[in-house]
């Protein structure tokens, strides 16, 4: 047994939160593709965790439709995390979902030595509740302000402006990802599940407020596929 | 504190994340025992930011600790003359002036001299694309925490996320300017920021007046050490454990022998570079000061950071006196855009 000075050592926890639109407009192919894509991304997330042994990747899931709720509330280690499919019906209460995320990101709810959390918001529509006040709260609380936020739009009806706001406005380096077909959704969800996660796992310190750019630089996002798409896969 | 003798142990290792990125150790740690009849010691630790916009922050951190040691060598030569042979009233007045000087002038000197050292280095190793001063300083961005102690007072200065824990004789832990809970993530104050001298947290204590003034052990560390612990309590416990160790029979030998392997263990959890410096009261009668190895101050101060090679040589030359542990080779000259 080591005679090393000090108390218990621990990997630094990193919370990854999926925020999934489960409104009625997501019914059918969109929600099927979402379930498939997230399930497919999990092995890649485990690989990122394996590549960063000093980080403990923990996953949580919020769904929103008429209101918002935790689909997976307890931070769950990615190695034991399994995706249980979500279903679609109801409105698009995105603001309630952001509020729920804010509750979890309050200082006293977060681990002392946590890494910046990663929030991935997936939606095909426009908020039906007060999104702006929830977003204001998110960027006001310390862990919300430090979070890495990615937005994925499904189909042409998604409100890109809202997703851009969620990601931090025009100053951020990356734009919302727009998936108009199932293949792109799989690709984008895989990217959002791994690349920002990897970046947040390897933070460098930086002078406070030194630049307007994201505090966790994220490599460029993939482009939509230019290969022929099966018409039945188009949202 | 009069009559106390002090000893130091320090080590620094490069963390796994930087090994994977093929980056050198971004931390630097240095200590120096000032020669003379009054026991005095300075120790400094610095953490270079290590981001893409700070490609020379390993050099920035080394310059920071070197600057700190030099500034205190010069400052002490003036301060001790004001304190020597003073009557009580005069000494009290002198200490008031010294505290003011440390808070206002020395913090400014630390920043100004670091900037000057950075400019000298960047002149000798220019960026591929010319940078304005803001970007030049950012390229070398680093934090700085310093402790200086003598028989009359202790001063602790902290800029950024390197920590300083002080263990009192009754094994209580004091923490200098702990981050408040609202400060989350990796943002930190830095020498490269505007008005950096105003951002220092300074803690000044007359000898014997407070628990800090009666410190038995000072632990300076980079945040890669602190973030390895599950909790603040475990982190602070480490300082108490070190204090107990170095005061036990062969504890100091154990620490000197084991410190690097412990740092590796800490780094396995934080992933970051890890540096720890311990400044502690000797628990055995000290040998006469004259027998301690001393350094010709001029030799130390006159080393200039003319080129990367000369810079490295500077540290190697002074390694036995100014400890600059595990500092890797300087990085390639990069532009920071």
Image: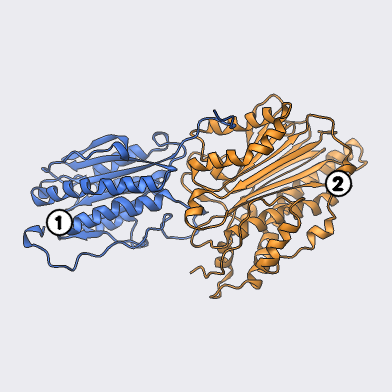
Chain colours: A blue, B orange
Q: CA distance from mark 1 to mark 2?
A: 75 Å
Instruction: Respond whether the residues carrying marks 1 and 2 are from the same subunit.
Output: no
Q: Is residue B173 above or below residue B54?
A: above
Q: Secondary structure at mark 1?
A: helix
Quadrant in the picture for residue B95? top right
- Residue holding disc 1: A182
Foreground mark, 1 or 2, reads 1
- Marked residue chain, label 2: B
Q: Is residue B230 above or below residue A52?
A: above
- Marked residue chain, label 1: A
Give whichever of B290, B151 is nearer the camera: B290
Quadrant holding the C terminus of chain A: bottom left
Coordinates of residue A49 in the picture (x, y in percent): 36, 45
- Residue holding disc 2: B80
Residue sticking out furthest to the bottom: B129
Coordinates of residue B153 in the picture (x, y in percent): 78, 39
Coordinates of residue A39 in the picture (x, y in percent): 21, 45
Q: Is residue B202 visible?
A: no
Q: In the figure, is residue B41 to the left or right of B256?
A: right
């Amino acid at each position: 047994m080591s005679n090393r000075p000090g108390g218990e050592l621990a990997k630094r926890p990193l919370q990854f939160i999926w925020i999934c639109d489960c409104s009625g407009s997501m019914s059918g192919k969109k929600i099927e593709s979402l379930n498939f894509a997230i399930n497919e991304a999990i092995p890649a997330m485990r690989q990122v965790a394996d590549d960063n042994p000093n980080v403990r990747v923990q996953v949580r899931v919020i769904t929103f439709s008429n209101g918002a709720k935790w689909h997976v509330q307890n931070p769950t280690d990615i190695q034991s995390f399994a995706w249980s499919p979500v279903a679609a019906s109801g409105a698009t209460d995105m603001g309630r979902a952001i509020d729920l995320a804010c509750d979890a990101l309050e200082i006293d709810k977060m681990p002392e030595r946590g890494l910046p959390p990663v929030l991935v918001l997936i939606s095909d529509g426009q908020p039906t509740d007060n999104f702006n006040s929830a977003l204001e709260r998110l960027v006001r609380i310390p862990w919300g302000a430090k979070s890495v936020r990615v937005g994925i739009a499904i189909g042409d009806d998604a409100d890109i402006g809202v997703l851009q706001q969620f990601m931090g406005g025009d100053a951020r380096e990356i734009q919302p990802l727009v998936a108009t077909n199932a293949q792109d959704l799989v690709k984008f969800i895989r990217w959002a599940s791994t690349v920002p996660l990897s970046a947040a796992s390897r933070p460098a310190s930086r002078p406070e407020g030194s630049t307007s750019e994201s505090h966790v630089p994220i490599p460029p996002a993939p482009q939509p596929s230019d290969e022929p798409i099966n018409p039945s896969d188009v949202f | 504190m009069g009559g106390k003798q002090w000893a130091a142990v320090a080590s620094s290792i490069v963390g796994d994340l930087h090994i994977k990125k093929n980056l050198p150790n971004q931390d630097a740690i240095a200590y120096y025992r000032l020669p003379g009849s009054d026991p005095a010691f300075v120790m400094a630790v610095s953490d270079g930011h290590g981001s893409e916009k700070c490609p020379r922050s390993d050099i920035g951190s080394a310059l920071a600790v070197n600057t700190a040691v030099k500034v205190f060598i010069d400052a002490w030569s003036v301060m001790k003359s004001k304190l020597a042979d003073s009557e009580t009233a005069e000494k009290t007045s002198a200490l008031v002036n010294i505290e003011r000087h440390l808070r206002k002038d020395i913090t400014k000197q630390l920043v100004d001299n670091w900037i000057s050292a950075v400019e000298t280095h960047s002149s000798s190793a220019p960026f591929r694309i010319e940078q304005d001063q803001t970007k030049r300083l950012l390229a070398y961005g680093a934090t700085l925490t310093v402790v200086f102690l003598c028989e009359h007072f202790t001063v602790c200065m902290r800029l950024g996320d390197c920590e300083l824990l002080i263990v009192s004789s009754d094994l209580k832990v004091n923490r200098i300017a702990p981050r408040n809970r609202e400060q989350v993530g990796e943002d930190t104050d830095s020498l490269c920021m505007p008005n950096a001298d105003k951002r220092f947290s300074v803690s000044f204590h007359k000898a014997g007046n407070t628990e800090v003034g009666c410190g038995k052990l000072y632990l300076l560390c980079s945040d890669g050490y602190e973030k390895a612990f599950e909790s603040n309590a475990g982190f602070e416990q480490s300082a108490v454990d070190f204090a107990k160790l170095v005061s036990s029979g062969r504890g100091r030998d154990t620490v000197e022998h084991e410190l690097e392997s412990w740092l590796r263990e800490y780094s396995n959890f934080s992933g970051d570079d890890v540096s720890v410096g311990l400044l502690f009261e000797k628990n055995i009668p000290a040998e006469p000061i004259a027998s301690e190895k001393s350094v010709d101050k001029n030799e130390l101060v006159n080393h200039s950071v003319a080129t990367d090679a000369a810079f490295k040589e500077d540290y190697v030359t002074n390694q036995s006196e100014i400890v600059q542990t595990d500092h890797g080779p300087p990085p390639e000259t990069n532009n920071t855009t």
